[in-house]
Image: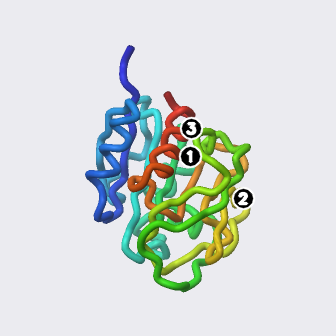
Amino acid sequence: MAKTRVLVVNNGTLSLKQLRTRLEDLGSDTDVTDAASVPARLDGRHQAIVLSGTKVRAYDQDYYKPLVDLVMTTHVPVFGICGGMQIIAVANGARLADGPQRVGGHEVQVDTDEPIFTHVKPTVTVFHRHTLYLQEAPAGFRSIGRSEHAPVEFLRSDDGRIHGAQAHLEFRTDGLEILRGFAALYQ
């Protein structure tokens, strides 16, 4: 049986190697591109897209237009991590708010009826490294996880194809288990 392929869009993350390793440990081969070089279509080569975190560029809609167009028009599952989620949310009308700097493990409550949370408990500990927070899900999306500082720790599109996490899931066991739940959507 052929391995699934995931297109990883590197938005400037410091943890690309860890993210790729997690996805490969879950049984997928990965190809990496940057946001400026994403293809207009996947043409069947990739079964999912994962957007890495980024430095504070989520509002640069011109720069991210090709990426957002691909994410919104493809038919494969998409997962935006930290800045990757923020790019998707901002492109769909959301606003980010400044908040406390959080670095390290933090508890988040998740909606365990969501398929990506199949392998975790209702409270997960995930790794954060940021100061911007999504306060409300944009139209066409809903919050599926929340914490003390962020009412939208996890996001899902109404059709269930696009997911996002404020946290860096490439770190910590709960992050791996959430990625395992996402991998079940495309493998």
User: Nearest the camera: 8 or 68?
Assistant: 8
User: Nearest the camera: 71 or 146?
Assistant: 146
Residue named by callout 1: 73
Characterize the local packing of mark 2: few (<14), some (14-19) or many (20 or more) Cα atoms within 10 angstroms.
some
SS for dot 2: strand
* Rendered-image quadrant of the N terminus: top left
Q: In the figure, is residue 5 to the left or right of 85?
A: left
Q: Is residue 43 above or below residue 20?
A: above
Q: CA distance from mark 3 to mark 2?
A: 19 Å
Q: In the figure, is residue 133 to the left or right of 57?
A: right
Q: CA distance from mark 1 to mark 2?
A: 19 Å
Residue named by callout 2: 142
Amino acid at the residue labelled 2: Arg
Give coordinates of residue 6: x percent, y percent: 39, 38
In the image, which is nearer the foreground, mark 3 or mark 2?
Answer: 2
User: Nearest the camera: 109 or 67?
Assistant: 109
Give coordinates of residue 183: x percent, y percent: 50, 36
Residue named by callout 3: 75
Q: In the figure, is residue 51 to the left or right of 184?
A: left
Question: Is residue 161 at least partly visible in the picture?
Answer: no
Amino acid at the residue labelled 3: His
Q: Residue at x 37, y 24 (%)?
A: 3
Q: Residue at x 65, y 39 (%)?
A: 115
Sequence-wise first label, 3 or 2? 3
SS for dot 1: helix
Q: Residue at x 36, y 44 (%)?
A: 22
Q: Residue furthest left?
A: 17
